[in-house]
Image (cartoon, rainbow, N blue to C red):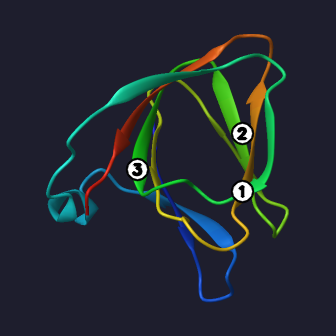
Amino acid sequence: MGIYRIYKGEDDRSHIEKLPPENQFWKSVKTASTMFLKEFAPGTYLDWHPAPRKQIVIILSGRLENTFRDGSTQTFNPGDVRVIEDTTGEGHITRVVGDETVLVAVVPLDT
């Protein structure tokens, strides 16, 4: 399990960093008014896109991969948490890895 932050850098591109569990980010989350589940079918590929909102996305089943403009990729497995903040700029690519449907819990952040 890992906790990752996806954010827009000064170069207007999305970047990723692994956060240690004791990271202070969690103290800045003031409210989350809802949570919903979302499925991604095998073969899903979302070309370059920013996130629709600041949100926390927890992988419940399946495997997702994000690709960034620098060519790096990160695969996320069940239990991984993504803090997604790249709501502007060119964003990232998202694709389902393998033949299993991906189920995620999405927590939109009010902060």
- Marking on residue 99: none
- Asked whether, in this view, residue 67 is left or right of residue 39, the answer is right
Q: CA distance from mark 2 to mark 3?
A: 17 Å
Looking at the image, the residue that sits furthest to the bottom is 10
What residue sits right under mark 3 in the picture?
Answer: 55
Which label lies toward us, 2 or 1? 1
Disc with the residue nearer the chain's start (1 vs 3): 1
Closest to the observer, 107 or 27: 107
2 or 3: mark nearer the eye: 3
Q: Residue at x 78, y 59 (%)?
A: 72
Q: Label 2 belongs to which residue?
A: 65
Density class for disc 2 (Cα within 10 Å; few <14, some 14-19, many ≥20) is: some
Q: Which quadrant holds the N terminus? A: top left
The residue that appears at 26% across and 63% down in the rendered structure is: 111
Secondary structure beneath label 3: strand
| Disc 2 + disc 1, Cβ < 8 Å | no
Determine the secondary structure under disc 1. strand
Q: CA distance from mark 1 to mark 3?
A: 15 Å
Q: Nearer the viewer, residue 63 or 56?
A: 56
x, y percent for residue 104: 49, 26
Residue 23 seen: no
- Which residue has dot 1 on it? 49
Residue 32, position in %: x, y? 21, 46
Q: Residue at x 25, y 35 (%)?
A: 34
- The amino acid type, in three-letter code, at marker 3 is Gln
Dot 1 surroundings within 10 Å: few (below 14), some, or many (20 or more)?
some
Q: Amino acid at mark 2?
A: Glu
Quarter residue 101 falls in: top right
